[in-house]
Image (tube, rainbow, N blue to C red):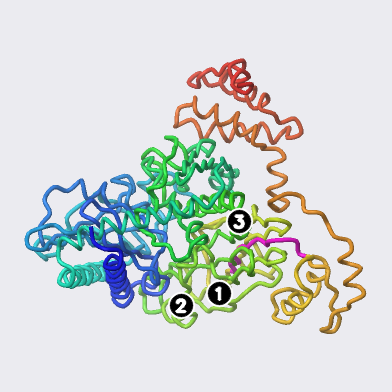
């Protein structure tokens, strides 16, 4: 065991090595989505595959706890100069959708395997049924592009050109994909070189012992944070607007039990796996990166200086029921798992808001839409390119307003400069900025939404908008703060042919068509009437809040740029009472008046008995039955509706209402 001071120095060196890997990736990548948006990760990993160092200033920050162990274990012959790759979501559950190509390299010193270096990039396109490969319309993983299990792509430093040519044959922009693969290999080389330099300084034994101690140190800090939270059981549900095209809300339910420094997570009550691409391929591992990112963000908010790596999530035990949206069975489509992961993050934020309300903010916007354009340039080149994410603001408070249009928990995805978009893609950007009055009102205001509006210049174009969400169900406010505004997606706004697209994520376009994407906004924290009048006036002067909303939401009358103190005092005297911890906005409030927690318990019991391939169908039939008579929706009415289904379809199992009643009583 090395000393604490020496361990801290080693941690700094390892973090610097990971940062160097990240900068190599950014500077050598071909695609805008990697070099500008920075959807990539880099890791230093133990010989067992656990991440002990990753960048904190570049790339996708939710991969701090990534475990390559399952795919590393599928290979039994590692040599110096080897590089392996995987993108199949069901082969080891490291890659989580086909565009994410993960690569890793063993690092040897004096014949000993001392660690692995690895990285992934999100390729803009991996082939498949739609440009950019991903859409909620897809129903099977086979539609989402070329897949490969863990496979050697380099031996003795020589690239397997046949494999690369096979990939190029199946994608829409082979030059771009090859260029990004080259960046990945350069990133690995940087990592290997930096590790050798660290070993030169610390020696093999201290390096290998230190990498394990860094995992232990992160675990110890995570436990200290959890111990500062009251023991108890906390439960929260969060929803995606739709579980499929024109579908019904998709529920993530988490029951979190804190006992001392241990955290147990139970996802029972989450929706069954869906016949769309929202499924999250986790293999049932409750410490999976798709699951734990919301926990990591919450812990980091509670203690920003804590070390983050795979040791952080050792505090977890839990249950991800098989055949649910958080643990689907192949060949379920999984391309939009990032949308569902964002919903899961919001569920964690709801849990920790209850557990530590004076330390956690309101809900961030979520639902950041990742826009891609497929087009043909004037010289005949076929283009498939990301033009950046369009999201919303952070949640307000405690002690600060939410940042405007930043993406909040999605802020690791950087925006692409307008000049680069117009140079690389045949579009004209008309508007790119913030939308006033969208942030949830509160003592600390939610951050406003961002908006991007652009005009297509060529025929046969298509816009894909991955992760469209929050068009119906808003980001919630807390402790008197109000929910943020919903997202909007419009073709040809302000014209006779204007069309609201909701959560549509594939839009064919003609020359001259205008697309406007507006993100959702963050929720507010605390009663809006507690916001100082001077801060409301500053919001109006800054263009974040209109004078009308200052009056109606904050009780502040502003006339000709000045406060009308008499009218303001009268408005604020009529102070609404706080109606509970959360303000969900009108749409979710109305939805949960029908689909209560008790009704979801009844449906969950049905889903546990129904074969996996029937669950999505049965859920939709139950929703239809309840929506037709929402005023009398009860657990018993749901069971009766299922009984009628069972009589029609003999492959469905019989569920005894009396047994369910006994379970309710228990």
As rendered, which of 301 and 242 lies closer to the eye?
301
Q: Secondary structure at mark 2?
A: helix
Q: CA distance from mark 1 to mark 2?
A: 10 Å
Q: Is residue 463 visible?
A: no
Check contact, mark 3 vs mark 1: CB within 8 A. no
Residue 512 image offset from top left, x and y in percent:
56, 74
Q: In the figure, 209 relative to 518: above or below?
A: above
Please tell me which of labels 2 and 3 falls first in the chain.
Answer: 2
Q: Residue shown at 59%/65% (left/top)?
A: 394
As rendered, which of 379 and 142 lies closer to the eye?
142
Please tell me which of labels 1 and 2 falls first in the chain.
Answer: 2
**Range of magenta residues:** 516-528
Check contact, mark 2 vs mark 3: CB within 8 A. no
Residue 432 image offset from top left, x and y in percent:
58, 77
Q: Residue shown at 52%/41% (left/top)?
A: 257
Q: CA distance from mark 3 to mark 1?
A: 21 Å
Residue 174 image offset from top left, x and y in percent:
28, 66
Residue 611 covered by magenta stretch: no
Q: Find disc 3 in the rendering and name its residue.
A: 470
Q: Find disc 2 in the rendering and name its residue.
A: 421
Q: Main secondary structure of the magenta part?
A: loop
Give the mark toward the camera: 2 or 3.
3
Q: Find disc 1 in the rendering and name its residue.
A: 454
Q: In the figure, 661 relative to 183: above or below?
A: above
Q: In this image, 236 relative to 37: left or right? A: right
Q: Residue shown at 54%/36% (left/top)?
A: 269
Q: Secondary structure at mark 3?
A: loop
């Amino acid at each position: 065991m090395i000393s604490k001071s020496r361990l801290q120095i080693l941690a700094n060196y390892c973090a610097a090595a990971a940062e160097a890997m990240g900068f190599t990736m950014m500077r050598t990548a071909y695609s805008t989505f990697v070099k500008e948006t920075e959807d990539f990760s880099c890791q230093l990993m133990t010989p067992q595959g656990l991440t002990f160092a990753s960048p904190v200033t570049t790339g996708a920050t939710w991969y701090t706890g990534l475990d390559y162990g399952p795919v590393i274990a599928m290979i039994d012959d590692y040599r110096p100069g080897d590089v392996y790759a995987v993108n199949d979501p069901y082969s080891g559950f490291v890659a989580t959708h086909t565009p994410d190509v993960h690569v890793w390299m063993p690092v040897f010193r004096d014949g000993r395997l001392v660690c692995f270096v690895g990285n992934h990039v999100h390729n803009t396109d991996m082939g498949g049924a739609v440009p950019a490969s991903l859409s909620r319309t897809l129903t099977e993983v086979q539609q989402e592009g070329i897949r490969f299990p863990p496979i050697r792509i380099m031996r003795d430093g020589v690239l397997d050109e046949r494999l690369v040519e096979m990939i190029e044959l199946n994608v829409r922009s082979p030059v771009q994909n090859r260029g990004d693969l080259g960046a990945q290999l350069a990133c690995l080389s940087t990592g290997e070189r930096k590790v050798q330099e660290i070993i030169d300084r610390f020696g093999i034994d201290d390096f290998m012992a230190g990498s394990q101690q860094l995992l232990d140190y992160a675990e110890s800090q995570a436990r200290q944070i959890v111990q500062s939270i009251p023991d108890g059981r906390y439960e929260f549900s969060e929803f995606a607007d739709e579980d499929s095209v024109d579908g019904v809300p998709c529920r993530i339910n988490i029951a979190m039990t804190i006992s001392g420094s241990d955290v147990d997570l139970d996802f029972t009550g989450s929706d069954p796996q869906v016949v769309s691409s929202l499924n999250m391929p986790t293999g049932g591992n409750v410490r999976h990166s798709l699951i734990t990112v919301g926990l990591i963000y919450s812990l980091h908010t509670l203690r920003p200086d804590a070390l983050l790596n795979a040791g952080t999530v050792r505090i977890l035990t839990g249950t991800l029921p098989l055949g649910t949206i958080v643990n689907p069975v192949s060949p379920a489509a999984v391309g939009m798992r990032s949308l569902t992961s964002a919903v899961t993050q919001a569920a964690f934020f709801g849990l920790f808001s209850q557990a530590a309300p004076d330390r956690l903010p309101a809900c961030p916007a979520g639902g950041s839409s990742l826009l891609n354009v497929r087009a043909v340039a004037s010289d005949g080149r076929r283009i498939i390119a990301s033009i950046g994410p369009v999201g919303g603001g952070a949640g307000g408070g405690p002690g600060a307003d939410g940042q405007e249009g930043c993406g909040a928990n999605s802020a690791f995805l950087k925006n692409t400069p307008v000049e680069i978009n117009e140079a690389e893609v045949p579009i004209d950007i008309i508007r790119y900025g913030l939308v006033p009055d969208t942030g949830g009102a509160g003592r600390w205001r939610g951050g406003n939404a961002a908006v991007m509006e652009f005009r297509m210049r060529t025929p046969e174009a298509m816009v894909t908008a991955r992760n469209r969400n929050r068009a119906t169900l808003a980001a919630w406010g807390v402790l008197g703060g109000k929910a943020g505004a919903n997202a909007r997606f419009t073709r040809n706004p302000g014209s006779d042919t204007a069309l609201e697209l909701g959560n549509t994520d594939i839009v064919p376009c003609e020359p001259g068509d205008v697309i406007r994407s507006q993100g959702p906004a963050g929720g507010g924290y605390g009663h809006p009437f507690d916001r100082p009048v001077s801060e409301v006036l500053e919001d109006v002067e800054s263009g974040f809040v209109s004078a009308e909303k200052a009056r109606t939401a904050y009780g502040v009358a502003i006339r000709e740029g000045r406060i009308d103190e008499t009218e303001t005092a009268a408005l604020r005297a009529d102070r609404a009472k706080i109606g509970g911890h959360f303000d969900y906005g009108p749409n979710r409030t109305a939805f949960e008046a029908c689909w209560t927690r008790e009704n979801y318990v009844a449906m969950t019991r049905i889903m546990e008995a129904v074969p996996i391939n029937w669950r999505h169908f049965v859920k939709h039939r139950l929703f239809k039955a309840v929506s037709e008579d929402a005023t009398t929706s009860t657990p018993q009415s749901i069971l009766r509706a299922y009984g009628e289904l069972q009589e029609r379809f003999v492959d469905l199992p019989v569920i005894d209402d009396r047994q369910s009643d006994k379970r309710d009583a228990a």
